[in-house]
Image (cartoon, rainbow, N blue to C red):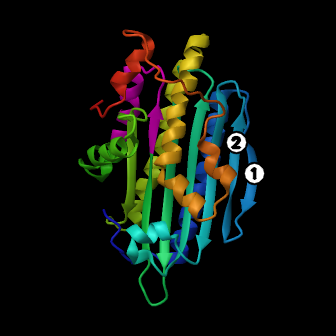
Amino acid sequence: MAADGKALTEIDTEVAIEQVKTYLLSLQDNICQTLELADGTGHFVEDSWTREEGGGGRSRVLKQGAVIEQGGVNFSHVHGSAMPASATASRPELAGRSFQAMGVSLVIHPHNPYVPTSHANVRFFIAEKPGHKPIWWFGGGFDLTPFYPFKEDVAHWHQVAKSLCAPYGDDVYPLYKKWCDDYFYLKHRQETRGVGGLFFDDLNGWGFERSFAFMQAVGNGFMDAYVPIVEKRKGMTYSDRERHFQLYRRGRYVEFNLVYDRGTLFGLQTGGRTESILMSMPPLARWEYDYQPAPGSAEAKLTDYLKPTDW
């Protein structure tokens, strides 16, 4: 499933780009509509933008809803004449190629500490050079970051992920679950960002149609995984204690996105729109020197979940 420079033999490049773009725009619409229903009062506000170097997108943000403190669901389709040096250093086959990158990415930060933060992303990349076959791949996934975790919620999350992977082979879920655990690992904290999910990249070895179908399964599956958890937990009562712990743990989210996240780095290095790239940041967060939860407390329980686990 590595990015091996496989050509788009099954479909014309321009047709492929249009197919993927049409799906991604529809996915953004569907996710926003579903989240607005789950929230009950909030509405996404759209901000369309263009990129001077080529391309653009539409960013949608919901602020201060009944459930969602801040959430963003972004679509982008950017292109350029050359990849940034950081990309070609690790992928020399991309040097001298123009590129197009498109995707939908989202992050939801709820008010209630018992409702997990969640992230999802699906994307398509293609690099071209006259006289050479195009290099293309799909990527994406979704992950869950609870503050006060419930095992039944985590099991549900992973069952949805496992079920959508099943038609593509028995090895797919274990492979992409492990990739998610490894990717969303904060080395300096020696803990995972949350309870994982799926992460895949460089997917083209199945051919275009099957690879695209899997990307769609992941994009569509996110709502099946997340909304039932939101509905179950959004009415739970909480105090300042839980809220303070939530803000402290949000700090880990910021640390990962600014230190490790590939999408953040790629967006900034290719001259992407800063407001949209940093949309994933929580509206409020806090840090506390050498914070240690009381042994046996609900806050201490989270530590048991921040490691790769067969849920």
Counting from the top left corner in percent of width and height, residue 187 is at: 37, 41
**Type of residue at label 2?**
Val
Q: Which mark is residue 61?
A: 2
Quadrant that contains the C terminus: top left
Circle 1/circle 2 CB separation < 8 Å: yes
Q: Which residues are magenta?
A: 142-162
Name the residue: 59% across, 43% down: 280
**Type of residue at label 1?**
Asp
Q: Dot 1 corresponds to which residue?
A: 47
Evaluate whether residue 136 shows in this view. yes
Distance from the alpha carbon under mark 1 to that under mark 2: 8 Å
Q: Is residue 127 above or below residue 291?
A: below
Q: Is residue 265 above or below residue 109?
A: below
Queried whether the magenta region covers residue 144, the answer comes back as yes
Q: Nearer the viewer, residue 88 or 72?
A: 88
Whichever of callouts 1 and 2 sits on the residue coming sooner in the sequence is 1
